[in-house]
Amino acid sequence: MWRQVMRLPRTVWLLGFVSLFNDATSELVYPLVPLFLTSVLMAGPKMLGLIEGISEAAASLLKLFSGVLMDRVGHAKAWVAVGYGLAAFSRPLFYVAASWPMVLALRFADRVGKGLRSSPRDALLAAAIAPAQRGLAFGFHRAMDNAGAVLGPLFAAVLLARGMPLREVFLWALLPGAVTLWLVSRVQNDSSVPHKKPTVFSWHLGGFPPVFRRYLLVLALFTLGNSSNMFLLLRARSLGLPAYQVPLLWALTSVVAMLLSTPLSALSDRFGRSRLLQAGWLLYAILYAVLGWMGGALPVVWLVFAVYGVFLAATEGVEKALVADLAPAEQLGTAYGWFNLTAGAVLLPASLLFGWLWQSVSVATAFSFSAICASLALILLRFWVLLPAQKTTVHR
């Protein structure tokens, strides 16, 4: 497998390193936001849910917009560059945030950048690799992304342990952000992305096969129970984890995901995408049930977050590879736009609902609701999405 990784196209490698440095920047900031809101700005879980929900929902709408436009006018690299640039400039500005509305504005700008770049970047990756290696390519990309997610929190933990104020840590996002933009400039023009005349855009997903539409519906159900990962970090803190260990905990998750993303996603090229997704969603349901009902056993918290990395490794790359399997080649940008819109737009009600259940009912209720959504999505994926399509020639 590793020989195959070394032979991946230059575009895949460059975009992998772009994600590494971008995520190092993002994850330097991301694990600190719930701490910053609760300990500095004195905002609670409801406000965290509002901020994350609005930001991610806006990003998701832009992912569809950028994907549709890319299919029509091309210029995938331009969308990628603008998206990464906006994120790189917004993250260090947390240093001057004095209220939760400003945190909302900065997270919104960061997610707008993600919305502009994600679908064109995924289309670039899918077009740069043969169909039989899509799992490998997307898994490698996720591994590089998670490598950055290891470096960022580790660096943040070191700075906090040395006594650096929380605000000043945000300024360190400048350096990896600059490297990200330089790497984006090295990506070649997107000549490999098909630019055939696409089907006229339809809010009813006209031109896409029924199995793709069913897949998006089930993905929406799973996402309804998959609120912002910041709630996981807030849960760890509520169980007694010291503040300086919160970035380390997320770094552990990212290490596991980094090590396993490539091999697990590559398995889907041989044994099927659906098996990996079903196993991953089942694992998610178990982990959320444990987090909701456990006491303050901190060693168990570390174990749960490590296994959560296995869930990420088994699903993130595979979900995107399956999109390329199910969608027409000339509509890759639009297909990834719909995929990202579905996964992100539902995050607004998911995060708002999770925050409300946590603060108004109980933490166990919030986490149990997520576990139930994942379980139902797993059943529908197996018996409603995949069974009717088993006689087709689509490779999963």
Image (cartoon, rainbow, N blue to C red):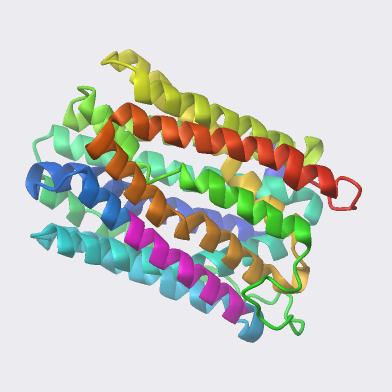
Q: Give the answer, above or below, for where 314 lies relative to 193.
A: above
Whether 66 is among the magenta residues is: yes
Q: Nearer the viewer, residue 14 or 396?
A: 396
Residue at 70% x, 83% y: name it.
200
Residue 176 at x, y percent in the picture: 33, 56
Residue 245 at x, y percent in the picture: 24, 28
Residues shaded magenta: 53-70
Res 203 quadrant in image:
bottom right
Residue 195 at x, y percent in the picture: 72, 81
Query: Seen in the image, is 95 located left or right of residue 295?
Result: left
Question: Can you say which quadrant of the picture contains the N terminus?
Answer: top right
Res 125 quadrant in image:
bottom right
Whether 198 is among the magenta residues is: no
Residue 74 at x, y percent in the picture: 62, 82
Q: Residue 184: in sight, yes or no?
A: no
Residue at 18% x, 56% y: name it.
171
